Every structure is written in structure tokens, then in C-alpha cells.
Image (cartoon, helix red, strand yellow):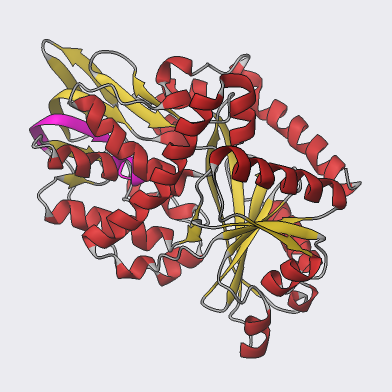
Amino acid sequence: MSTGMTRDWSALPSANSLWEATAEPARAFPVLSGESQADVVVIGAGYTGLSAAHHIAKSGLSPIVLEANRPGWGASGRNGGVITAKFRLSFREIDAVHGRAMARRMYEIAHESTDIVEELVSEFGISSAALTRAGQVKAAHNETTLRAAIDEANWMTREMGDVEVRILDKRGVREETGSDIFVGGVLNPGSGGIHPLNYLRGLADGVARRGVPIFQESPVLRLMREQGGIVAETPRGAVRAKQAIIATNSYSDLTTATAQMQRTLIPFRSAIIATDKLPRNLAGKLMPTGRTYTETKRMMRWFRMVDNRVIFGGRGAFGKQDSEAAFDALRKAMVGIFPDLTEVPLAYKWSGLVAMTLDSVPHIGRLDDRTLFSMGYNGAGVAMSSLMGRYLAAFVRGETPDVGLLDARRMKAIPFYPLREPAVRMVAGWYQFLDAIGQ
């Protein structure tokens, strides 16, 4: 086993987030020491890894979960807690390129993903997750984007049978948001919000209570094939298993054992701010329906109300650390939408990495006959990663589930990989310019 590791994994910084401040106490898991045996070793204790372990165990097989830090330290504890039945690639785009059958299959997968979150919350009794399914409003910032959103909604109703989608005029969006800057929008039912860290900790606790070993501060330093199986080595121990699952998403480069997965992903830092608690009269005025909201700009912002606080997030924070410039830009955008928040202090600022892919959809499947993976959620991972755990268990059992465009064989490596960060900066800067001039 490896013993030369000097990095203090427990010292990696946590997010200064609203979720950390309001989460249920974290269950303490042991550090892996010595050798263990399992049918499947799962690398990563986020939504993907824990859901996979749960569904593998329900199949009668024995999983072991290894986490480099603590469950929920990565994207599963740093996101905005928005649950949506969608991909970054629209169903209409899928239909145009891949045909109606594929569009319908992807539509089914997307809605299955939101449903499984509700199933897992119910199965494990995670009341602290505060799951809601009130829907999401896409708010248009000009007439051009409103027409596009309405056209898309009409297509979804006509071609996908999505009869519950509703078109809102300017007054309707004002009543929804409390903001007067939008010209209209579209309400999509079925979406919702959740306390993402409580959801994660509830999953971890529930999976552990059902007998699945979870080890924290146990990074996998080497993943090696051996006759009949695979070995995952950590600083103090090793797991021998028949199969391995890599569920590390944008944090795959924490060790060299999973770093190969980064070459298929474009990491994009997502920044989030949360206000102090608002006075009751102001809290009742903004976002009174409890839905989640997005806007139609290219550098999309999203917002929601949680416990009388406005949470506001978006893409555009660059680099490997939190960015004050990104937080300042978010606050400016938030006040532009909600002028009443001008004098309201911020209580929390945090960020995390989103894993983008070249084709704008996640991928799941086999790297080889012993190693599986699922990642690349493109900013919509709370629901989709929960679902992918179920599909990973099916792959482990030797099944070939229909995952549509998510098939691992469709995954493409990032060309000119060392240039990915300046390329992301350039594209994002162009999008920000177009948004600024109203295009």
C-alpha cells in the first residue's frame, strides 16, 4: 500500500456556504486502514457514488465507498440545490440532430432524474433536505429571448406532450419574482429545490446504516488491475474488488488515479452568494411562490429564496480558488434584478467546480471491463447524478441500460487540453460582452 502521501486531505478547505452553516451534523466515517474486499469499490462519496453504492447493495452485491475528503466536500455540497429535468442541450436540439426517438428517450431520463431524488429522500427519510417540487421559471430579459423561450415551450407541448408548461407575461413574471426587469417567461413544473448538503449527508447516513462501508479521508492514489479484479490503494490501505466505479466528476484531478477523467471535462467554477435574512415584508415580496428561477442570458444567473434569504448564483468564476471579482459581479447582477437588496449584506459566498463536456451532456458507462464511471453533469447534476447511480448499478450487474446520448462511447476528449482554461475564459468573456450589450 502507498505510504509516501504527505498531503493532509482533512485540511482541504470547505466551502463557506449557507449549506455548511445550516446542515445537519456530519456523520464521522473512518479512514481506510488495512485491506478490504468488495464486489465494487466506489471512488467518490458524492451523489453519484452514494446512489451507486445504494443501488449496488440493493442488488445483493457488496460495495465499499472511498472518499478523498469528507462526503459532500466536492460539488455535491457546493451547488445551488436546484433540481431540473433538463440537460444543457435542449430536447429540441437533440431532436434536430439525433431524431425524435432519441429526444423522447432523453426526455424520459431527465424526468426520471427528478423523480429519483424524491424517491431517495422518501426512502431514507431525509426531511432536512427540505425538498420542494414547485417548478422553475425561465425569466426572459428581452423580447428576443422571450420569443425563443415561448417557441421552445410550444415545441415541448406539441412534440413531447409537456402540457403543464405555462407561458407568463411581464406581469406574471413580476408576480413570481418581485422584479420588474423581465419581459415575460416560461414556467416549467416538476423542477424544484433542495438543501443539497443535507440531502448528501442523509444519503451517506442512510447508505451506511444499511451496511455499506464508507471511508473518508481515504484518497485513491493508485488503481491497478490484478488477476480477476482491481485494487484501489489509499495512503493507509487498499480495497480489492471485482469492479471499480469512478464518481469524482470535476474533482477527478485530486489524485493521479482518476486524473485521466479530467481530459474529458472542462472545469468551470460556479459562484454563489446568499444574503442575510431579509425583513419579513421584503422576504414576502421576492419570489413568494418558492420556485427556482433562471434568466435567459448566455452567462445564465439563477436565484431562489431559502429561509428568507436570496441565494444567487452563476458561472464565470475562473481559476482554482474563490474569486472576489466573481462574487462582486454576482452581487451587482443580483441588485440589478432586485434593487431592494442594495443595502442588504451578504452572509455567505462560496463556489465549486462544474464539469462541462464537449457535447453538453453527461456520460456513463465503462472505461474497460473492470472500471465504470459517470460524470460531466454540465451544471444540472443534483438530480442527474442521483439517477446515474441507479444506472451504474445496472452496468455492474452486466446489464446494458439505454442511456441515450449519455453512452460513454460518445464521450470525446478535450482537444488541446492544456489550453482549456484560457479557452474557457475567452468564450465566457465573449458571452459576458454579448449579455452586456443586450444581444
Q: Quadrant of the C terminus?
A: top right
Magenta span covers which residues?
34-49
Q: Position of residue 43 (x, y in %)?
A: 28, 34
Residue 45 on the magenta span: yes
Q: Quadrant of residue 62?
A: top left
Q: Position of residue 427 (x, y in %)?
A: 75, 31
Q: Is residue 304 visible?
A: yes
With respect to residue 203, does 393 lie above or below?
above
Q: Residue at x 60, y 47 (%)?
A: 270
Left or right position of 114 against 314: left
Q: Quadrant of residue 34?
A: top left
Q: Position of residue 218 (x, y in %)?
A: 25, 40
Q: Is residue 219 visible?
A: no
Q: Residue at x 52, y 16 (%)?
A: 412
Q: Residue furthest right?
A: 437
Identify which residue, 350 or 50, lies in the foreground. Answer: 50
Residue 251 on the magenta span: no
Q: Quadrant of the N terminus?
A: top left
Dominant secondary structure of the residues highlighted in magenta in the image: strand
Q: Residue at x 68, y 53 (%)?
A: 301
Q: Residue at x 49, y 56 (%)?
A: 190
Left or right position of 150 against 354: right
Q: Residue furthest top?
A: 227
